[in-house]
């Protein structure tokens, strides 16, 4: 039983080691815990939300360290950052192509697919030869909850 358990731990560590190598960052224990915690989160966590969870596993970690490593993850391409004009940095945990419904009152962010939004598939070329990589549409409005209050 113990051997099996160690085997799993090793596998996780190996996977993370490979990920770090692929993205050109140094592997540390703190980064591994941070990565695992973030993998278990959904939606668009802010560094503060990530910090609250990581602190339970690594009590000595500081918010500044969490910030620094999230930036590193985003810059090296481990995670994707969502568009930043909603205030603080948010990490995108949904790897599928999608857009966002942003509530102008409570600032909640909800994912919405291209089809549900009524958009036709993204065109690859736009005016002046602009080559499209991806579309990220922000729909600003009031969420159902805020409309009731
Ligand atoms: Zn709202
Ligand atoms: Zn999203």
Image (cartoon, grey):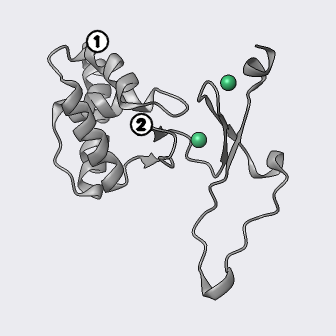
Residue 49 found in image quarter: top left
Quadrant occupied by the C terminus: top right
In the image, taking residue 2 as reference, residue 26 lies left or right, namely left
Mark 2 or 1: in front is 2
Q: Earlier in the sequence, mark 2 or mark 1?
A: 1
Residue 100, relative to residue 49: is it above or below? below
Mark 1 secondary-structure assignment: helix
Q: What residue occupies the far bottom of the structure in this picture? A: 128
Question: Which residue is pictured at 41% across the width and 40% down the height?
Answer: 89
Viewer-nearest residue: 28 or 123: 123
Ligand 2, seen in the image, is in the quarter at top right
Q: Position of residue 36 (x, y in %)?
A: 35, 30
The residue under label 1 is 56
Mark 2 secondary-structure assignment: loop
Q: Position of residue 106 (x, y in %)?
A: 61, 24
Viewer-nearest residue: 98 or 32: 98
Question: Which residue is pictured at 47% across the width and 27% down the height?
Answer: 41
Q: Position of residue 107 (x, y in %)?
A: 59, 29
Residue 64 found in image quarter: top left
């Amino acid at each position: 039983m113990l051997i099996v358990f160690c085997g799993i731990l090793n596998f996780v560590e190996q996977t993370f080691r490979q990920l770090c190598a692929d993205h050109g960052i140094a592997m540390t224990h703190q980064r591994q815990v941070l990565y695992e915690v973030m993998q278990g989160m959904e939606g668009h966590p802010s560094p503060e939300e990530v910090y609250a969870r990581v602190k339970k596993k690594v009590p000595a970690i500081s918010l500044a360290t969490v910030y620094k490593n999230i930036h590193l993850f985003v810059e090296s391409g481990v995670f994707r950052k969502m568009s930043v004009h909603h205030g603080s940095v948010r990490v995108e945990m949904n790897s599928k192509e999608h857009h966002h419904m942003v509530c102008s009152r409570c600032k909640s962010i909800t994912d919405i697919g291209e089809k549900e939004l009524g958009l036709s598939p993204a065109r690859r070329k736009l005016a002046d030869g602009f080559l499209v990589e991806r579309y990220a549409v922000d729909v600003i409005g009031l969420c159902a909850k805020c409309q009731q209050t």
